Image (cartoon, rainbow, N blue to C red):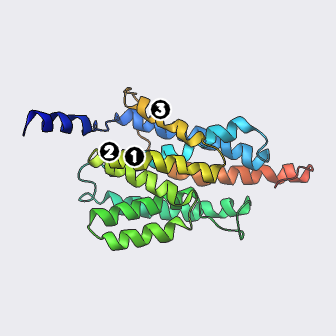
Amino acid sequence: MTDSAASLKSVWTMPRLVVADGTVEGLKWLGLLLMTGDHVNKYLFNGTLPFLFEAGRLAMPIFVFVLAYNLARPGQLERGVYQRTMKRLAAFGALASIPFIALGGLYAGWWPLNILFTLLALTATAYLIERGSIVWAALVLMSAGAMVEYWWSALLFGLAVWSYARKPTLAAAGVAVIACAALGFINGNMWALAVLPVLLAATCFDLRMPRLRWAFYAYYPLHLGALWLIRIPMSHAGYLFF
C-alpha cells in the first residue's frame, strides 16, 4: 500500500464504539428516568410540561442504543441471546399493551404498538441479518416499521448502531445520525438529536453500576399500570384526560 493510500485509509477509518458495561447500565437507567417523566407529563398532565416532553425525546434512542450495542457483542447469536431477548420483549410487550391501550391516545385505539415491540422488531431484524436471511430481514423491517412506535426511524437508528458496533463504518454512522434526525418528523421537534452527545460522552466514562437483568422488562408494564391506576381517582375528582 502506498503512503497516499494509507493516509486516505486512516482518514476514513472510524473509531471503535466501546462503552463500559456499567455505563451501558447507567444509560438504561437514564432512559427509564426520562421515559417516566415523559409518561407522567403525557398521561397525568396532558402534555402541558414542555421540558418533560423534550427531555423524553431522548429516552427511545437511548433504549435502542443500549439494545443494539448489547446485541452487537461477539458471540450473541451462538449463545442464543437474540432468541431470549425476543421472547422477553414479546411477553412483556403484550403485558404492557393492556395499560398502554387503556391510557389512550392511540390511533384506532391500539396503534402503534408500544416501544417493547419496537425493540422486538429491531432484534428480529438484526437476528435475521446475522443469520444471512436478508430478504426476511427486509420484510420484517418494512412491515414492523409501520406498526410500532417511532416507526422506521427507530429501527434504522438501531440497525445503524448495531452495524457500527460490529464494524465501524462512515456509512453506519451517517445512517444513525440521519435516522435520529428523522425522528423530528414524528416528535415535532429535533430534541432526539441531543442524544448523540450523550452517547458520545458515555464512551468516556466507566460507571460502576450492577446489571439488573429483568428490571427494564418489568418496569415498563408496571409503570404504565401505575399511571393507569393513578388516573382513576383523578378522573373521579374531575380531571379530564386527552
Residue farthest to the right? 238
For label 2, the SS is helix
Compare residues 136 and 91 and report the one nearer the observer: 136
Distance (Cα) linking label 2 and label 3? 17 Å
Instruction: Identify residue for label 2.
Output: 170
When the figure is inspected, residue 210 is found, relative to residue 187, above or below; the finding is above
Q: Nearer the viewer, residue 229 or 179?
A: 179
Q: Are marks 1 and 2 in contact (CB under 8 Å)?
A: yes
Q: Secondary structure at mark 3?
A: helix
* Residue 200 locus on image (x, y percent): 41, 33
* Residue type indicated by callout 3: Pro
Q: Amino acid at mark 2?
A: Leu
| Residue under the image location 81 percent in, 55 percent down | 242
Q: Residue at x 62, y 54 (%)?
A: 186
Pointer 3 local density, CA inside 10 Å: few below 14, some 14–19, many at least 20: few
Query: Is residue 5 visible from the viewing direction of this image?
Result: yes
Disc marking residue 197: 3
181 over 194 or under it: above or below: below
- Pick out the residue farthest to the left: 1
| Residue corresponding to mark 1 | 174
Evaluate if marks 1 and 3 touch, with contact meaning CB atoms under 8 Å apart. no
Q: Which mark is residue 152?
A: none
Position above or below: 239 against 122: above
Categorize mark 1 by other alpha carbons within 10 Å: few (<14), some (14-19), many (20+).
few
* Quarter of the image with the N terminus in it: top left
Separation of marks 1 and 2 at Cα, in angstroms: 6 Å
